Amino acid sequence: MKTRAQALKDLRRTLAEAGFDTAALDARLLLLAALRVPATELITRPDAPLTPEQDEALAAFTERRLNHEPVARIVGEREFWGLPFRLSPETLVPRPDTETLVETALALLPDRQAPLRIVDFGTGSGCILVALLHELPNATGLGIDLSFGALATARANARLNGVDDRGRFVLSRWAEAIAGRFDLIVSNPPYIASDVIPALDREVREHDPRLALDGGPDGLEPYRILLGEAERLLAPGGLLVVEIGYDQAEDLKSLAGLHSLEILKIAHDLSGNPRCVAM
Ligand code: GLN
């Protein structure tokens, strides 16, 4: 059987030859997941031979990667806001861009110790809500999704990150099944226009759930609903913070005007694109 070092080298070459820009990193992450050992073992025991089980797992992972499945999905976990999140086929892979939303919401809250009530529409893996609950020790949160599978994953992630005593996860189409008022409404809704979906990267198009991407004919349908519900759901002085597509800032300004919501901030992601709007 191959040694770990040999397996790493071979996999890196296989992925590079198949055109993956991230071959070296992918190979390392996939090998570690197949070995099921701590990362340091690649350095301390590079000459250990793979067991038959490890070899089989690595072959399966390699085939999935060659089929353009994102590494995070293959290894079943992704880091967001420095915290670990489990994934399932029914959740979007958390994007670093979405940390902009968490950062913006936190920066605009006047008091992080307050007993804030938060609701997250389209919670998916739960990454936004769990990150917020992690930062806001006295807040409680409601994660809403249309997908049972996503809710189960979000619940597991709340537990994994020690905030399950303050987070509840509820099946609802938008606000249909919920009552009460909230100090903070957050959402990374599906915002891709339906006819743009075929042009997305293969990794997104074939492996992220369509329900988490498709924002209707112009990609703005979820914002019409969210901004429409905001008046009923926001407590006095409450905050609504949503992620947007790189070209949707102007549309959001118009929609906010229709609902007499004041735009407090448009925040940019690491690539410099407008990525989140606070109202
Ligand atoms: N930003 C995601 C993408 O790049 C889309 C996520 C969404 O629709 N909320 O595909």
Image: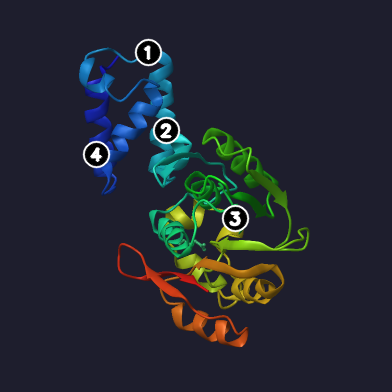
Q: Residue at label 1?
A: 51
For marks 1 and 3, the one nearer the N-term is: 1
Q: Name the residue under label 2.
A: 61
Query: The disc labelled 4 sits on which kind of residue?
Result: Ala
Q: What residue type is labelled 2?
A: Phe
- For label 2, the SS is helix
Residue labelled 1 has its Cβ within 8 Å of some atom of ligand 1: no
Q: Local crowd at mark 2 within 10 Å, few (<14), some, or many (≥20)?
A: many
Which of disc 4 and disc 2 is earlier in sequence? Answer: 4
- Asked whether the viewer can see residue 46, the reply is no
Q: Where is residue 175 in the image (x, y as percent from the top left)?
A: 72, 63
Report how far apart the C-alphas of labels 4 and 3 lie in the structure: 43 Å
- Residue 172 is left or right of residue 213, and the answer is right
Instruction: From the image, state whether disc 1 or disc 3 is nearer to you.
Output: 3
Label 1 vs label 3: CA separation? 50 Å
The mark closer to the camera, 4 or 3, is 3
Secondary element under disc 4, as helix, strand or loop, is helix
Earlier sequence position, callout 2 versus callout 1:
1
Residue 193 in the image, given as x and y percentages of width and height? 54, 73
Distance CA(mark 2)–CA(mark 4):
15 Å
Disc on res. 116:
3
